[in-house]
Amino acid sequence: MLITKKRLVHAMTYEVILLIIIAIALSTILEMPLEVTGGLGIAMAITSVLWNIVFNTLFEKFEQKKQLKRTIPVRILHAIGFEGGLLLFTIPMVAYALNISFWNALLLDLAMTICILFYTFIFQWCYDTIEQRIYSN
């Protein structure tokens, strides 16, 4: 699979912003050192970047095949699909890094996922808007 500059910029921008938000929020909410939550955030970000590249490539092919326009319902489908798939990879990371049970990791990861769904939707919408302005000139 060829990774384009556009895809790499998209994935890295998404992850850097999210990493900062997650590390600070978890450290504050869980009263844990920023090193712990930041380390977890980095592991999750690396996993997410890889998933982001694969998922978005497949999603764009799906969009083309079904001739979908990037409407709000399509972006909601995108956000749910991306975060749902990522959840399968991150639950074990959360359990290990925070030394909690898989059940508690699932609950924490679901809570993070709900927050990240909103972030993903807003990020994608903004990214699409910026990209459209850049390429329409």
Image (cartoon, grey):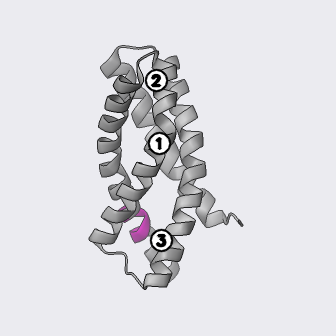
Q: Residue at x 51, y 73 (%)?
A: 60
Residue 137 seen: no
Task: Look at the picture and state if 3 lies above or below 48.
Answer: below
**Residue type indicated by callout 2:** Ala
**Residue type indicated by callout 3:** Glu
Q: Are marks 1 and 2 in contact (CB under 8 Å)?
A: no
Q: Which mark is residue 52?
A: none
Q: Quadrant of residue 98?
A: top left
Which residue was labeled with disc 2? 95
Image position, residue 129 (x, y; %): 39, 70
Q: Residues within 10 Å of mark 1 (few under 14, many from 20)?
A: few
Which residue was labeled with disc 3? 131
Membership of 76 in magenta stretch: no
Q: Which one is earlier in the sequence, the residue at label 2 or at label 3?
A: 2
Task: Look at the picture and state if 69 lies above or below 86.
Answer: below
Q: Quadrant of residue 100?
A: top left
> Which segment did they paint magenta?
125-129
